[in-house]
């Protein structure tokens, strides 16, 4: 792969080539991507979507929105540091094409900002609830009418693929969705393959899938423009990752490892002693005098968090640059932090987060409720597809707001239902569930 192509400013529908050296420096194309994402309704809905604790009543616990903003900040730092070193290694990128190190930061920040935009309510359990409805619930009735890949899209419903759909799908009056640069879309695509075959290799890019069959052509357009390395051809397509995707992933890994741990401590689910015991291993040169001068637990933990994030940013940049040529060849098969000298410390922190936070009683109870809520919403809406519409079905359609049911295939309609449910906030899905059950009447 070549950086000149990977940094493409092209947007869906462009007829003229966009050149970096002709860009308006006061409103650079890659920065426009960030703006378009942050002003989108799908991004705004992340303010009421689960990061750690579903439907949390506390003010300081992270939502998907605050998590995404923090990942974007870390991603920007990663991109700028890598960009600075890449321009020193490949001076023609700057001298001939006009790229600057901030461009790399802007691309990674925009892709990182959008990385969770396709996630449904109730976190990863929401993805599982949608998939389970089609794999094991009433949604099984559609299997015989869909192709294997279409059915797998539903059974393994994937937030990353749904995010690509949200970013690229044409809407009335908005051809090409948000019309982001192809460089940002490429960096966004963590898993550049379709839903089948499942995990064909142990390469990190094959762990999940990154687009639904409905967006296959849009995905291929982006991949070809960027010159992504094709790893599988024929009926099952797959590509190597855009190199900057590794930085987007690292930013996410850094934030949820450290900041979810911080949330657990502030919620009282993890003792403060654990913070010092485990996070200090990521901060070899901690100023203990300053640490003990901080008077509140939140301030002390916040100090450790900032230092730990700084350590892991430097580590990820070092690993990226050491392996940059292998990454360009599609031969680097792991997440950056999986190659880190701090891998054991990161694993220790994640294990405590899993046992004390993600599997805490409050989270488990709310995830169970989330399963019931999303399964009910899907079932009520999917019944309209298979039934001869009754008066009740007509009322349900009105409750779901989005359904003119014009010419669509069964697959398209099912994807529309899943997409509509997925962009709901936690609170809205709960509200509609209560109305469907007759539990909430004004």
Image (cartoon, grey):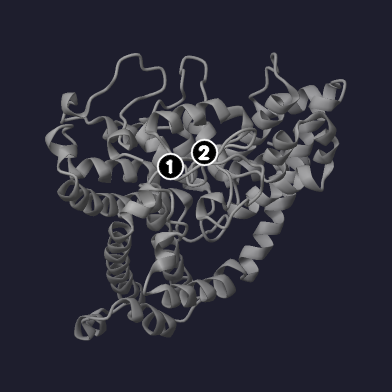
Label annotation for residue 292: none
- The residue where tag 2 is placed is 163
Residue 345 in the figure: left or right of residue 365: left
Q: CA distance from mark 1 to mark 2?
A: 9 Å
Front one among 48 and 4:
4
Quarter of the C terminus within the rendering: top right
Q: Earlier in the sequence, mark 1 or mark 2?
A: 2
Image quarter for residue 104?
top left
Front one among 267 and 86:
86
Which residue is at 61% across, 71% downward?
360
- The residue where tag 1 is placed is 188
Q: Position of residue 194 (x, y in %)?
A: 60, 39
Relative height, residue 239 to residue 147 (above, below)? below
Image quarter for residue 139?
top right
Residue 254 in the figure: left or right of residue 284: right
* Residue 440 appears in the rendering: no
Q: Position of residue 337 (x, y in %)?
A: 40, 65
Q: Residue furthest left?
A: 95
């Amino acid at each position: 792969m070549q950086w000149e192509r990977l940094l493409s400013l092209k947007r869906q529908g462009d007829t003229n080539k966009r050149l970096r050296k002709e860009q308006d420096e006061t409103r650079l194309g890659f920065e426009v991507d960030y703006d378009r994402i942050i002003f989108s309704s799908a991004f705004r809905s992340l303010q009421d979507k689960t990061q750690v604790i579903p439907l949390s009543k506390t003010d300081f616990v992270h939502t998907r929105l605050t998590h995404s903003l923090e990942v974007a900040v870390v991603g920007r730092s990663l991109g700028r540091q890598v960009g600075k070193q890449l321009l020193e290694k490949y001076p023609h990128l700057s001298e001939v094409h006009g790229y600057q190190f901030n461009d790399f930061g802007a691309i990674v920040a925009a892709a990182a900002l959008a990385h969770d935009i396709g996630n449904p309510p109730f976190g990863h359990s929401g993805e599982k609830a949608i998939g389970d409805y089609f794999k094991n619930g009433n949604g099984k009735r559609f299997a015989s009418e869909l192709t294997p890949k279409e059915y797998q899209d539903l059974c393994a419903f994937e937030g990353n693929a749904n995010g690509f759909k949200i970013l690229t799908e044409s809407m009335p009056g908005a051809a090409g969705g948000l019309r982001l640069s192809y460089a940002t879309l490429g960096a966004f695509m963590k898993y550049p393959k379709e839903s089948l075959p499942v995990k064909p290799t142990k390469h990190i890019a094959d762990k999940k899938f990154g687009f639904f069959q409905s967006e296959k052509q849009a995905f291929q357009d982006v991949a070809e423009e960027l010159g992504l390395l094709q790893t599988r051809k024929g009926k099952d397509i797959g590509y190597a990752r855009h190199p900057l995707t590794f930085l987007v992933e690292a930013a996410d890994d850094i934030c949820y490892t450290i900041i979810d741990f911080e949330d657990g401590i502030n919620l009282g689910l993890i003792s403060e002693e654990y913070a010092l015991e485990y996070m200090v291993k990521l901060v070899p040169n901690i100023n203990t005098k300053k640490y003990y001068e901080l008077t509140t637990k939140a301030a002390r933990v916040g100090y450790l968090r900032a230092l730990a994030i700084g350590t892991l940013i430097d580590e990820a940049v070092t690993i990226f640059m050491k392996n940059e040529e292998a990454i360009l060849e599609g031969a680097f098969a792991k997440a950056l932090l999986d190659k880190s000298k701090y891998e054991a410390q990161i694993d220790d922190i994640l294990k405590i987060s899993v046992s004390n936070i993600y599997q805490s009683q409050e989270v488990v109870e709310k995830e169970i409720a989330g399963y019931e809520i999303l399964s009910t919403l899907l079932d009520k809406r999917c019944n309209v597809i298979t039934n001869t519409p009754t008066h009740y079905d007509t009322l349900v359609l009105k409750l779901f707001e989005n359904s003119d049911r014009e010419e669509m295939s069964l697959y398209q309609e099912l994807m529309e239902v899943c997409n509509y449910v997925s962009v709901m906030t936690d609170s809205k899905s709960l509200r509609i569930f209560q109305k469907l059950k007759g539990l909430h009447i004004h």
